[in-house]
Image: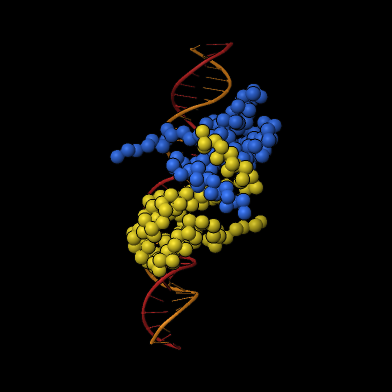
Chain colours: A blue, B yellow, C orange, D red
Amino acid sequence: MTLIDKSKYRKVSYLGQKIRETREKQNLLLRQVAAHLEVDTALMSKAERGERNLNRDHVLKLAQLLKASEDEFISLWLCDKVIEAVGDDPLAVKGIKKALRKIKN
Amino acid sequence: MTLIDKSKYRKVSYLGQKIRETREKQNLLLRQVAAHLEVDTALMSKAERGERNLNRDHVLKLAQLLKASEDEFISLWLCDKVIEAVGDDPLAVKGIKKALRKIKN
DNA sequence: TTTGACTTGTCAATAAGTGTCAAATGTAAT
DNA sequence: ATTACATTTGACACTTATTGACAAGTCAAA
């Protein structure tokens, strides 16, 4: 039996990466950003590394604080969700394309 | 305050629709299909109407039983997941496109 | 070695998902 | 109208996932 140690598994988070990048460029501390969202610093740390998800409001507040585009942040957030939804399924691309077609109607 | 009655909310399920369509064309009963998957008929009914999700194995077994394309069923299943992941977010399309781009690398 | 930033693991509480059962509804034939 | 059977519905017990909080850990610079 092959088990995956989920506690150590770290998923990709394009939004997380972007947040960290942006935050560091502005010399803001995790602590400060976390305080602005009124969440624990640990949560912020995990969010930036894709270990925890933020909710929509958090993402919007972050965009404001970091003077970034809300639309970009939200679409990165959705992007992460989509990637998580399809996992590493070999038909992932096919499924996403199908969804895109359907959703456009 | 506006509350959504989740118990009555029915999400779209393109896979569910396809399953029902295919099943009926072959004059199979929910009961029979359910038996083949070794699940309750009620679950099958809900799955076809998008009230419950099937797992990957169920989807594959269904494709076989219904003599349909496994790839098509799986990608419809993923498609449903993607659509669920983005919900009705106004930036859904943008997010999905971004995911598609990222995942292609 | 102390400080400060960040990370990690654990925990309890809550939410969400899963499959099943029994009862309800719908429908077609008798 | 009654029966027979397919499907749907709501409730339920059970499992698994997610959440936010906390304490302890690492790590680098002073």
Of the pair B3 and B45, the residue shown nearer to us: B45
**Residue name at image x 68 percent, y 33 percent:** A68
Going 66% across and 24% down the picture, which residue do you hit? A26
> In terms of image quadrants, where is residue B12?
bottom right
Identify which residue is drawn at 52% across, 36% down. B104
Q: Is residue A97 left or right of residue C20?
A: right
Name above or below for residue B80 compared with residue D11: above
Q: Position of residue B97 (x, y in %)?
A: 59, 41
Of residues B93 and B45, which is closer to you in this image? B93
The reply, left or right, for residue A84 in relation to residue A103 is left
Residue C5: image x %, image y %?
A: 57, 23
The quadrant of the picture occupied by the N terminus of chain B is: bottom right
Position of residue B35 relative to residue A45, above or below, is below
In the rendered image, which quarter is residue B40 located in?
Answer: bottom left
Residue lying farthest left?
A1
Q: Position of residue D19 (x, y in %)?
A: 53, 42
Q: Nearer the viewer, residue C22 or A17?
A: A17
Residue A53 percent across, percent down from the top left? 54, 39
Choose top left, top right, bottom left or bottom right for residue C19. bottom left
**Is residue A6 shown left or right of residue D29?**
left
Task: Say which residue appears at 58% left-offset and 43% top-offset.
Answer: B96
Residue B63 appears in the rendering: yes
